[in-house]
Image (tube, rainbow, N blue to C red):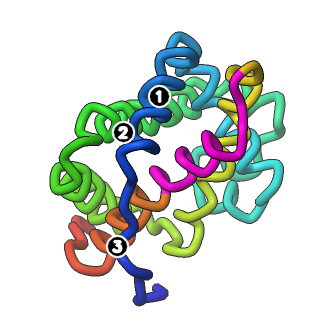
Amino acid sequence: MHCTVDVNPELTDKQIEIILDSYEVWRKDIEKVGLTTFMSLFQTHPEVQEHFLPFKQLSQTDMEQSAILRSHALRVMATVEKCLSRINNPEKIKDVMEQLGGRHVNYTSKYDYIDLMGPQFVYAIKPRLEDTWNEELEEAWLQLFKVMTYHMKQGMIEKPVITY
């Protein structure tokens, strides 16, 4: 496992504001956003799919129909929602994401794959925000994912929960 983590990223007040405003627009499509995020991840980085045992060797069509993928995508979106509900309290985001990172050690998640989620998520929400989409909005969401993944990776390093 790669064991260094960059400097602790933070969100500005302006980024928080535009993230929360835009979330209200796409939140009704949360299941589709989650599914699109993972389908895009597996299409652009097929090597990642091989590390998700339930999805290993599945075709794109089978993946789109997979109840397991839908369930996982919804859990990831629930984590995004948890972070959004704690967005004004960075310590609480840290706690949520470090615990999640610690659990992912059990799933043999690759440390370096964690950073791939932000760009895939942005790809998934962009069409739902096309009327208001701009570079500032994109950077704000990417920054939120930098915050989330930073703490998740810290949890993988510092707080692994080994159950095997």
Q: Which residue is drawn at 83% across and 39% down?
A: 59
Magenta stretch contains residue 93? no
Q: Which mark is first along the chain, 3 or 2?
A: 3
- Please give left or right for residue 60 compared with residue 126 in the image: right
| Residue 144 placement (x, y as % from top left) | 45, 50
Which amino acid lies under the numbered mark 2 shown in the image of this protein? Thr
One can see residue 150 in this view: yes
Q: Who is closer to the viewer here, 104 or 6?
A: 6
Q: Which of marks 3 and 1 is in front?
A: 3
| Residue 149 placement (x, y as % from top left) | 43, 61
Residue that label 2 marks: 79
Q: Is the magenta stretch mostly helix, strand or loop?
A: helix
Identify the disc placed on residue 156. none
- Please give left or right for residue 24 compared with residue 50 in the image: left
Mark 2 to mark 3: distance in Å?
A: 19 Å
Which amino acid lies under the numbered mark 3 shown in the image of this protein? Asn
Q: Judge the density around disc 2: few (<14), some (14-19), many (≥20) Cα neighbours within 10 Å.
A: some
Which amino acid lies under the numbered mark 1 shown in the image of this protein? Leu
Q: Residue furthest front?
A: 14
Up the image or down, 115 lies above or below 16; here it is below
Residue that label 3 marks: 8
Q: Residue at x 49, y 33 (%)?
A: 18
Up the image or down, 100 lies above or below 58; here it is below
Up the image or down, 138 lies above or below 108; here it is above
Q: Judge the density around disc 1: few (<14), some (14-19), many (≥20) Cα neighbours within 10 Å.
A: some
| Mark 1 residue element | helix
Q: Who is closer to the viewer here, 23 or 62?
A: 23
Residue that label 1 marks: 74
Q: Give the range drawn in magenta.
A: 132-145
